Amino acid sequence: VQLQASGGGLVQAGGSLSLSCAASGGPSSRYTVGWFRQAPGKEREFVAAISGTSGSTYYADSVIGRFTISRDNAKNTVYLQLNGLKPVDTAVYYCAASRYTSRSTVYTVGEYDYWGQGTLVTVSS
């Protein structure tokens, strides 16, 4: 499975961006897809995920109410809508796919089998 993340850019605080993660090369519609981010000097952290089977969504506490994850299986694409952006949201955003995960492990970097190349989101104050 290959993942291609896109949609990053420079935005002012309070602005919005829409990220996309296009998948190819496998039965990715059944996989859980997650978004993670990594700021300079920090570890990669979970942002949001969506189950391929149930459509259940999961969010980090820091983005609840601001970010929305969704998927279009017909297009093999997962989206992450970022609203109310803050400077602390500045990071490289990665999408990843997991063949097998559970509600308790969906937040874990190591549970994901495939990773995209990342897209940079910069939020200015």
Image (cartoon, rainbow, N blue to C red):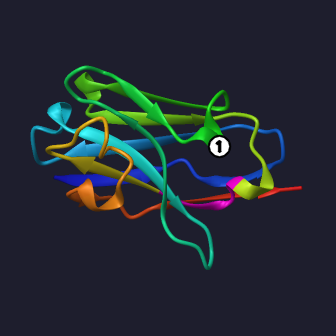
Q: Is residue 119 left or right of residue 2?
A: right
- Residue 28 at what x, y percent from top left? 17, 39
- Residue 52 at what x, y percent from top left? 23, 29
Q: What residue is at 19 percent from the left and 38 percent from the top?
A: 31
Residue 118, above or below 76:
below
Q: What residue is at 70 percent from the left and 34 percent from the top?
A: 83
Residue extending farthest to the right is 125
Residue placed most toward the observer, 35 or 108: 108
Residue kind at label 1, given as amino acid type? Ser
Q: What residue is at 45 percent from the left and 61 percent from the top?
A: 118
Residue placed most toward the observer, 34 or 110: 110
Q: Is residue 69 left or right of residue 25?
A: right
Question: Is residue 91 one of those drawn in magenta?
Answer: yes
What stretch of residues is rendered in magenta? 89-93
Provide the major secondary structure of the magenta segment: strand
- Residue 94 at what x, y percent from top left? 44, 57
Residue 33, above or below 53:
below
**Residue bearing mark 1:** 62
- Residue 13 at what x, y percent from top left? 84, 46
Q: Is residue 54 left or right of residue 85?
A: left
- Number of numbered discs overlaid on the protein picture: 1
* Tag 1 secondary structure: helix
Residue placed most toward the observer, 85 or 24: 85
State which quarter of the image contains the C terminus: bottom right
Q: What residue is at 21 percent from the left and 47 percent from the top?
A: 98
